[in-house]
């Protein structure tokens, strides 16, 4: 990738247009054809691309705007899940934050392409910027489902990882250079980390792409979902063979920084969250710059990427756009300081 120092990117999702939700509902009712729904998705993605380009983001995504949710998009396209589950808490912090969970009724199996490569090709064909794709990780898919088949959760997560590996290979073969795996639930289950890292490394082994692992505290409706702390994951987290770690820094006053002071980065690039997506206030470029300066005291600039803390799906589009612009302008301030 041809990128400046301190490249800017996004975690994945972008503000979901209300009109797209309406069209999806009309499609469920049979009033909109499959072709018309696809056109609506195309137009939403094009608008998302344009926002990121105008804001000046260096490495962009399609905003995940074709996905029902980061979970349902995958579970609806993998055999072994059915979608008539009951309401269930998403995380372990607030039991009132719930969504209906899919049910695992049989051994999960790949039934063909999930479609990530096709969607990346659309993104790549409509921008001159560098791009990446995001894929929900196997533990997230497992934890957001009601398991009525597997006796061993590790076996379930391994099976899901095997399915996702085939999807990742398809994406890499299409030409995507940067693939991000999203595992927000890792924070909630630190006791499982050793074998989760083992499964993760096996899932991406030998695939010709750059990999990023994103771990957050959950972000449904801009609310935190998990009780755990990043400190519960270190230093075992550094054993992942991802090239990048993407973590929240803005919402927690750069909490992970002490961990990297203590354990180092083992040569990994760190994607630093410099935009607090849970804060409705829009950061100024100087606020962003001040957050970056703190990071530079610990991590060399060549190893730092910049992003929002998490996805932007649940915020108004004007706020999401303004926050991205602030991130980019803040990065420019620090680039000039480094240059001089």
Image (cartoon, rainbow, N blue to C red):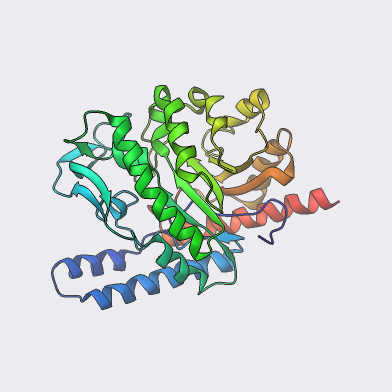
For the residue pair 320 and 108, the one nearer the viewer reads as 108
178 over 181 or under it: above or below: below
In the rendering, at what x and y percent does residue 120 appear?
Answer: 46, 65
Residue at the image position 55 percent from the left and 55 percent from the top? 178
Query: Does residue 157 appear to the left or right of 62 in the view shown?
Result: left
Q: Quadrant of residue 257?
A: top right
In the rendered image, which quarter contains the N terminus? bottom right
In the rendering, at what x and y percent does residue 220 appear?
Answer: 35, 44
Furthest residue in direction front, as rendered? 206
**Count of numbered marks:** 0
Query: Does residue 35 appear to the left or right of 299 in the view shown?
Result: left
In the rendering, at what x and y percent does residue 151 appear?
Answer: 21, 28
For the residue pair 266 and 96, the one nearer the viewer reads as 266
Observer able to see residue 214: yes
Residue at the image position 72 percent from the left and 38 percent from the top? 296
Residue at the image position 51 percent from the left and 37 percent from the top? 251
Observer able to see residue 312: no
In the rendering, at what x and y percent does residue 16 appear?
Answer: 36, 60
Q: Quadrant of residue 111?
A: bottom left
């Amino acid at each position: 990738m041809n990128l400046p120092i301190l490249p800017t990117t996004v975690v994945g999702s972008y503000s979901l247009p209300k009109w797209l939700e309406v069209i999806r509902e009309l499609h469920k009712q049979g009033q909109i054809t499959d072709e018309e729904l696809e056109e609506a998705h195309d137009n939403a993605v094009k608008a998302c691309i344009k926002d990121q380009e105008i804001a000046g983001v260096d490495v962009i995504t399609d905003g995940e705007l074709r996905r029902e949710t980061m979970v349902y998009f995958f579970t609806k396209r993998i055999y072994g899940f059915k979608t008539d589950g009951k309401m269930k808490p998403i995380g372990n912090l607030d039991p009132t934050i719930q969504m209906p969970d899919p049910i695992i009724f049989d051994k999960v199996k790949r039934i063909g392409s999930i479609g990530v490569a096709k969607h990346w090709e659309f993104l790549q064909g409509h921008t001159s910027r560098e791009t990446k794709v995001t894929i929900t990780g196997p533990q997230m898919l497992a934890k957001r489902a009601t398991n009525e088949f597997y006796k061993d959760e590790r076996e379930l997560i391994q099976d899901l990882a095997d399915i996702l590996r085939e999807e990742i290979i398809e994406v890499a073969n299409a030409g995507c250079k940067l693939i991000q795996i999203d595992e927000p639930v890792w924070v909630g289950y630190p006791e499982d980390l050793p074998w989760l890292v083992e499964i993760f490394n096996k899932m991406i082994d030998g695939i010709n792409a750059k990999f990023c692992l994103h771990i957050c505290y959950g972000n449904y409706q801009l609310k935190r979902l998990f009780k755990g702390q990043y400190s519960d994951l270190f230093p075992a987290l550094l054993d992942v063979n991802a090239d990048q770690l993407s973590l929240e820094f803005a919402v927690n006053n750069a909490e992970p920084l002490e961990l990297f002071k203590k354990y180092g980065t083992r040569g990994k690039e760190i994607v630093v969250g410099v935009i607090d997506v849970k804060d409705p206030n829009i950061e100024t470029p100087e606020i962003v710059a001040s957050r970056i300066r703190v990071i530079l005291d610990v991590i060399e600039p060549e190893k730092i990427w910049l992003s929002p803390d998490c996805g932007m799906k649940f915020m108004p589009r004007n706020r999401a756009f303004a926050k991205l612009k602030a991130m980019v302008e803040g990065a420019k301030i620090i680039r000039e300081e480094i240059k001089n």
